[in-house]
Image (cartoon, grey):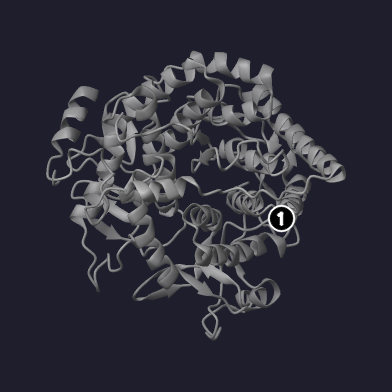
């Protein structure tokens, strides 16, 4: 199947091949290759600050905070190991093993690089032995969500390999990627949303069988590019880049249509036709990491994948014009919008964007975008800082500046006056996005106030979410633990939330942003791998 897919991708059925002599993605939207002088200029860009405070007293505080977070990680990890080792998750309230990601051990693999970064040698060795025995040809009988399999499993294995140099991780990443490549064998090359590894059939999680969403077709490019580098096999990179080929070739922006603003892509797409179906553009769940991977894959390629950079710039123009909006509290928010108007509703997933935009701003020396990133960070942080628990909700809404509040419920008006926003879905599932963006700002500016913000959030999490089995979710961030707990602890708690918390208090050169690019699941990939346009 891998050989057949490779041939299919090379033929590029139904997609023009005028640029086939170049590695997929190197030719920009206007038909140009990256210029060497631009690459040399980008190579000089420094992402991390060089002015971190280094007093002995502050170092002791930071070391103590890092140790506290590490101890809490170990508390959660030991509960997982005792009650659910090798399972996808542990229910932190009932202490039961839970299968959510095909039974391959999502928490085990998603946690590997965090364990390594924290210097937990015994735990890493034990986990390595466990990973070595996994057979990805067998699962729990349920279809795999291809996107989640990539970011949690394949990404986690690649990162573990780069940090440890243990080839078992690369071997397992390649084995699983070869299985998942079959999901890309569709009429367009856009992958199925769900893939049954045992029957070799695809489908959709909900809705028509050929439905997929923007994030779940556009969040392979980082992992598959690196896997092609490591294996010297272009098939993975070609599969991921073909998604862009189809999205761009089959969809032309047209005013009044579902896709009306260049670079602001609707959420839902038909993998059979390659055409967008519906879903107003936004930066939240279902869209978020598509945009994130444009700039990050470009950076990981050593600035060679010109098309990704061009797509990022085009998208950013639309985002600035139609997605961001100042609220009645004068903060800048991210909504759902296009040239037909803005819906002033948002979710915690959007809060990744200030950090990613700050990263892009440093890579491109774009001070204007850095200012916007900071404004968006303030509103994102505010969703945590203003609640009694210092923890933010899953979804929230805002009132655009100058609008009247007559369409809002009385409770929503009251919360806007109290917090600056209203809570739409008040629960919290230990999601990392706000912490992640604050981490980026800390590393980029060197300003200790951002580390203090993260510590403040961590105190709220410890006080409200810590339980015997690790860390549970909250039913209502306004009420905290007294409002009830949710027996859910996804693998990203170990892969992302704890990693960003911990790295905010290590020495800044630990997983430096000048040396690594983080995947959407928080897995660091080395930027030092050279790429000259070939695999």
For the point 19% across and 43% down, the residue is 188
Of the pair 259 and 107, the residue shown nearer to us: 259
Residue 171 place in picture, x, y as percent:
42, 18
For the point 65% across and 58% down, the residue is 392
Of the pair 136 and 45, the residue shown nearer to us: 45
Location of residue 9 with respect to 383 vertically, above or below:
above
Location of residue 511 with respect to 359 vertically, above or below:
above
Locate the N terminus and report the quarter of the image it occupies: top left
For the point 50% across and 47% down, the residue is 44
For the point 36% across and 35% down, the residue is 225
Of the pair 42 and 275, the residue shown nearer to us: 42
**Quarter where residue 258 is shown:** bottom left
| Structural crowding at the residue carrying mark 1, measured as other residues with C-alpha within 10 Å and reported as few (<14), some (14–19) or many (≥20) | some
Residue 222 place in picture, x, y as percent:
41, 39
The tally of labels here is 1
Residue hosting label 1: 447
> In the displayed structure, does residue 122 sit left or right of residue 189?
right
């Amino acid at each position: 199947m891998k050989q057949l897919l490779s041939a299919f991708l090379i033929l590029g059925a139904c997609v023009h091949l005028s640029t086939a002599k170049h590695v997929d993605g190197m030719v920009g939207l206007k038909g140009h290759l990256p210029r060497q002088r631009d690459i040399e200029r980008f190579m000089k860009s420094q992402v991390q600050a060089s002015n971190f405070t280094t007093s002995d007293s502050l170092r002791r505080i930071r070391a103590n905070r890092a140790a506290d977070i590490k101890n809490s990680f170990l508390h959660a990890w030991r509960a997982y190991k005792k009650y659910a080792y090798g399972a996808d998750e542990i229910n932190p309230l009932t202490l039961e093993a839970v299968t959510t990601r095909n039974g391959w051990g999502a928490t085990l693999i998603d946690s590997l690089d965090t364990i390594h970064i924290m210097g937990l040698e015994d735990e890493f060795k034990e986990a390595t032995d466990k990973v070595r025995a996994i057979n990805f040809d067998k699962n729990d009988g349920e279809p795999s969500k291809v996107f989640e399999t990539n970011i949690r499993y394949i990404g986690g294995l690649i990162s573990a390999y780069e940090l440890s140099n243990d080839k078992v991780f690369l071997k397992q990443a390649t084995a699983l990627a070869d299985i998942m490549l079959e999901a890309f064998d569709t009429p367009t090359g856009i992958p199925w949303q769900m893939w049954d590894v045992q029957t070799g059939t695809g489908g959709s999680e909900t809705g028509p069988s050929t439905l997929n969403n923007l994030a779940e077709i556009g969040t392979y490019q980082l992992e598959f590019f690196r896997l092609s580098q490591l294996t010297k096999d272009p098939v993975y990179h070609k599969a991921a880049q073909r998604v862009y080929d189809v999205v761009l070739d089959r969809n032309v922006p047209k005013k009044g249509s579902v896709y009306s603003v260049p670079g602001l892509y609707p959420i839902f797409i038909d993998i059979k036709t390659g055409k967008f179906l519906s879903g107003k553009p936004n930066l939240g769940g279902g869209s978020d990491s598509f945009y994130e991977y444009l700039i990050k894959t470009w950076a990981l390629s050593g600035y060679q994948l010109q098309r990704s950079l061009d797509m990022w710039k085009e998208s950013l123009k639309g985002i600035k014009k139609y997605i961001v909006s100042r609220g009645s509290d004068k903060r800048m928010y991210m909504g759902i919008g296009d040239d037909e108007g803005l819906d002033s509703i948002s979710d915690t997933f959007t809060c990744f964007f200030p950090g990613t935009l700050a990263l892009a701003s440093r890579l491109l020396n774009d001070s204007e975008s850095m200012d916007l990133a900071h404004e968006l960070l303030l509103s994102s942080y505010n969703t945590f800082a203003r609640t009694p628990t210092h923890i933010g909700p899953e979804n929230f809404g805002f009132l655009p500046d100058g609008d009247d509040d007559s369409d809002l419920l009385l409770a929503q008006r009251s919360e806007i006056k109290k917090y600056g926003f209203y809570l739409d879905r008040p629960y919290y599932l230990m999601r990392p996005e706000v912490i992640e963006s604050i981490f980026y700002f800390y590393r980029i500016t060197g300003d200790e106030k951002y580390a203090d913000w993260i510590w403040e959030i961590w105190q709220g999490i410890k006080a409200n979410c810590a339980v015997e089995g690790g860390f549970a979710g909250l039913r209502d961030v306004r009420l905290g633990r007294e409002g009830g707990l949710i027996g859910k602890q996804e693998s990203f708690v170990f892969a992302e939330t704890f990693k960003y918390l911990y790295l905010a208090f290590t020495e800044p050169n630990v997983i430096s942003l000048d040396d690594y690019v983080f995947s959407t699941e928080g897995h660091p990939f080395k930027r030092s791998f050279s790429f000259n346009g070939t695999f």
